[in-house]
Image (cartoon, helix red, strand yellow):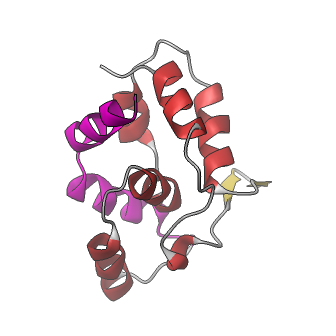
């Protein structure tokens, strides 16, 4: 099991702070109720999210809870997993926009279940 503290170290070590998929490159913001929170990039967004969790919490729970396609796309890209087919599917079915984050994140998780993420993250440890 990968803990949040371990995932934080792995994500912090990622060299590229931006999404590799151009469609997600400008989706750095998200809404919490009526407030818009802006992050300079997806890496900082991940680190802030993980920083709010208990260090010994399961990263699997965090991964399965994320409702943001851009965050998941960034994680997958940074773990050298190919997201091109998922992004193409999202573009063809829903279009990429800020109102589809829950649907987009479901598509990413269906294509890349947690077991795939855990295996890729262990290679980075």
Q: Residue at x 61, y 61 (%)?
A: 18
Residue 109 at x, y = what percent? 29, 52
Q: Is residue 38 left or right of residue 93?
A: right
Residue 100 belongs to magenta span? yes
Q: What kind of secondary structure does the magenta stretch mostly adopt?
A: helix
Residue nearest the observer in this picture, 117 or 91: 117
Residue 31 at x, y = what percent? 68, 56
Q: Residue at x 23, y 46 (%)?
A: 113
Indicate whether 42 appears above or below 51: below
Numbered-mark total? 0
Q: Is residue 105 left or right of residue 71?
A: left
Figure quadrant of residue 120: top left
Residue 64 at x, y = what percent? 35, 39
Quadrant the N terminus occupies: top left
Quadrant the C terminus occupies: top left
Indicate whether 69 appears above or below 63: below
Residue nearest the observer in this picture, 16 or 112: 16
Q: Is residue 115 left or right of residue 12?
A: left
Residue 18 belongs to magenta span? no
Figure quadrant of residue 95: bottom left
Residue 25 at x, y = what percent? 60, 72
Task: Give the magenta-colored segment's residue range.
Answer: 98-125
Q: Residue at x 52, y 20 (%)?
A: 5
Q: Is residue 84 left or right of residue 50?
A: left
Residue that protrudes farthest toward the top in the picture? 56
Q: Residue at x 52, y 79 (%)?
A: 23
């Amino acid at each position: 099991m990968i803990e949040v503290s371990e995932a934080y170290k792995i994500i912090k070590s990622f060299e590229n702070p931006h999404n590799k998929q151009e469609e997600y490159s400008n989706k750095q913001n998200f809404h919490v109720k009526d407030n818009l929170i802006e992050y300079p990039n997806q890496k900082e967004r991940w680190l802030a999210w993980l920083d709010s969790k208990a260090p010994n919490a399961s990263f699997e729970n965090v991964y399965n809870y994320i409702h943001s396609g851009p965050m998941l796309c960034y994680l997958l890209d940074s773990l050298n997993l190919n997201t091109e087919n998922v992004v193409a599917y999202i573009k063809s079915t829903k279009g990429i926009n800020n109102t589809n984050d829950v649907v987009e994140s479901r598509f990413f998780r269906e294509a890349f279940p947690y077991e795939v993420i855990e295996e890729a993250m262990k290679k980075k440890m």
